[in-house]
Image: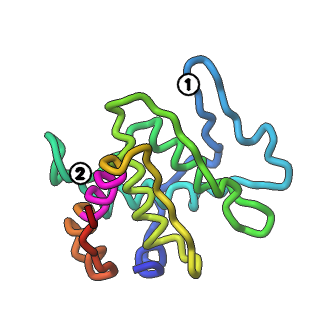
């Protein structure tokens, strides 16, 4: 799965301009201090497309429906995956988000973790998803497991282990 989805994936037309992120009147423009880094619109769009094409919501009123990222989630995801260093690796290798309650953080981050696990194509990659409390971490794990179980292609690429309590 790690190489199958991106290899057969046709990227939708994407803006060649890197998104700027604005929150509470503060704007982050990654191109302002990019140095030799560059923005790859195809790489930026690939995880956004992965959400829509491969992941479904697993609970609530959207359960069973394709996971369409909200505009702020999509722009943040594009920024994370679209910026490249001169050697072609991702510019942003770590991220820390603070987002208010009830904005879909756990579900979104579960999707990001699933994409990195299955589609990043980095040998022996380390993928960490952290939470402030064990129940929240368990919720993220359960969300990933449910997303994988909802897609036969993803399920064929993974083995889901029971979470210990």
Q: Where is residue 62 in the image (x, y as percent from the top left)?
A: 18, 44
Q: Give the range drawn in magenta.
A: 137-145
Dots 1, 2 in contact, CB < 8 A: no
Q: Indicate left or right for 96 with 65 as reference.
A: right
Depth order, front residue of 44/140: 140
The quarter of the rendered structure image containing the N terminus is bottom left
Q: Is residue 138 magenta?
A: yes
What's the mark number on residue 59? none
Badge 1 element:
strand
Q: How far apart are marks 1 and 2 (CA)?
A: 25 Å
Q: Element type at marker 2?
A: loop
* Residue 71, picture quadrant: top left
Asked where in the image residue 157 lies, by quadrant, the reply is: bottom left
Q: In this view, does 99 lie to the left or right of 96?
A: left
Q: To which residue does mark 2 refer?
A: 57
Location of residue 21 in the rendering, given as x and y in whole percent from the top left corner? 59, 33
Pinpoint residue 53: horizontal percent, then vertical percent.
32, 61
> Taking 101 as reference, is 49 above or below it?
below
In-image side of 138 versus 40 (left or right)? left
Q: For this rendering, which residue is in front, 92 or 72? A: 92
Question: Which residue lies at the image location 59% right of the left edge and 48% below the top edge?
Answer: 95
Quadrant housing the C terminus: bottom left
**Residue 23, label in figure:** 1
Main secondary structure along the magenta-highlighted residues: helix
Colour treatment of the image? rainbow
């Amino acid at each position: 799965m790690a190489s199958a989805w991106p290899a057969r994936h046709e990227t939708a037309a994407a803006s060649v301009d890197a998104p700027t992120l604005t929150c509470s009147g503060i704007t982050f423009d990654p191109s302002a201090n990019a140095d030799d880094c560059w923005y790859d619109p195809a790489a930026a769009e690939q995880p956004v497309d992965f959400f829509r094409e491969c992941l479904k919501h697993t609970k609530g009123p959207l359960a069973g429906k394709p996971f369409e990222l909200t505009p702020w989630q999509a722009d943040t995801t594009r920024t994370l995956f679209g910026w490249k260093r001169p050697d072609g690796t991702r510019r942003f290798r770590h991220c820390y988000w603070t987002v208010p309650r009830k904005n879909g953080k756990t579900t979104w981050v579960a999707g990001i973790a699933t994409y990195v696990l299955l589609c990043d194509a980095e040998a022996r990659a380390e993928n960490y998803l952290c939470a402030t409390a064990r129940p929240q971490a368990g919720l993220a794990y359960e969300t990933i497991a449910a997303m994988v179980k909802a897609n036969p292609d993803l399920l064929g690429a993974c083995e889901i282990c029971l979470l210990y309590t």
